[in-house]
Image: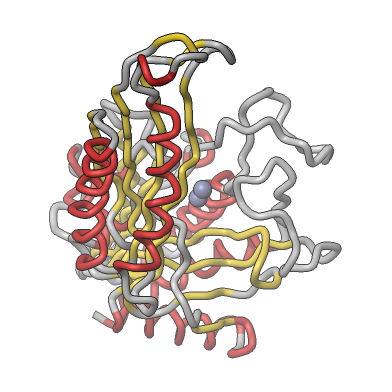
Amino acid sequence: MLAALDGLPLEISTGRGLSSVTAVLRGGPGPVVLLRGDMDALPVTEETHLPYASVIPGAMHACGHDLHTAMLAGAARLLSARRAELPGTVIFMFQPGEEGYAGARYMIEEGVLDAAGERPAAAYALHVTSQRVPCGTFSTRPGAMLAAADQITVTVHGRGGHASTPHRAADPIPVACEMVTALQTLVTRKFDVFDPVVITVGSFHAGTTDNVIPDEATFLATARSFSPESRGALAELVPRLIGDIARGHGLTAEAIYAAEYPVTVNDAAEAAFAGETIAEVFGTERGERAEFPLAGAEDFSLVLEQVPGAFVMLGACPPENDPLTAPTNHSAHAVFDDAALADGTALYAELALRRLARA
Ligand SMILES: [Zn+2]
Ligand SMILES: [Zn+2]
């Protein structure tokens, strides 16, 4: 990463808490623009069998962040070459730990937003997708772009015993199962269908064998929402439902509702500016205004809470795959076409150049 920036006229600082890299390119007098690329991989063993597949079991760039890193380094190179005509300053935010570790929060705490000495006027992030949009097509929208993601940790406290005499024990398993289905009912009965939420229980653990009732059952869920109202309602209603179901069966339960990433909200003017830039640089057919937000989540939302900006998706589906059926990001089979790299690099650079020139 640092080698890719070697020799460029950048002020580079590395993170204390993380392997982050902040690079500042100072042109002439003018405002500041921040460009962000995340860098981390996922704990997935790659199954694509491509010549350039990951050789490390349990580590795969299944979300395409390696493309973001390459594109942002490319933009740093392009903009460095045009430093003399740059009417302002660009912060390049090379961020680790997007996939659930809130790497952006650490970088913000360590001062990335103030790295140029003044707050950025705008911030942009690009993200590749292995499906949905054709290769080279950009997609963004004003307002909610991605969901908020929160984590629910539930522990049901029962009383273990012999499986043949459940009346002498307090079995936490059926109670926890009831909670899982009740959460799905909550989703459909307590939330406006036009301001949807998603709850998925992705982990459920209890017991050791068939003839023992365990003391406890635990499960983990993710909760996705698209508005502060729905997010607030989830945080209130989910723990109440869990507690009430446990009480109804004479058990107790804890539900910890932990806020993770807020809704990624694109500034309307910055999303429009990104759309215009895409149309002018690549042609109108290469950009789409996404009709709906995506239910994924992003810690770039934490940057957008403080700086107006836009998060833009870039199709990287290889031509042999149908975007509508291709394996999704995070799949062990996800494939990202490097043909998208030049366009993503160009868009990063154009967004910075044009936004600085406009201000
Ligand atoms: Zn991801
Ligand atoms: Zn990602």
* Nearer-the-camera pick, 282 or 157: 157
Quarter of the image holding residue 135?
A: bottom right
The percent position of residue 43, horizontal first and vertical second, equals 57, 30
* Nearer-the-camera pick, 219 or 273: 219
Q: Colour scheme used in the picture?
A: secondary structure
Q: Is residue 161 left or right of residue 358?
A: right
Residue located at (36% from left, 70% from top) = 310
* Nearer-the-camera pick, 162 or 184: 162
Residue located at (25% from left, 40% from top) = 248
Residue located at (53% from left, 40% from top) = 4
Residue located at (38% from left, 35% from top) = 175
Q: Is residue 198 left or right of residue 54?
A: left
Residue 86 in view here: no
The percent position of residue 209, horizontal first and vertical second, equals 57, 12
* Nearer-the-camera pick, 60 or 76: 60
Residue 146 in view here: yes
- On screen, residue 155 above or below 346: above
The percent position of residue 353, horizontal first and vertical second, equals 39, 72
Q: Is residue 70 left or right of residue 359?
A: right
- On screen, residue 13 above or below 351: above
The percent position of residue 6, horizontal first and vertical second, equals 48, 37
- On screen, residue 141 above or below 345: below
Q: Quadrant of the C terminus?
A: bottom left
- On screen, residue 116 above or below 244: below
Disc tally is 0
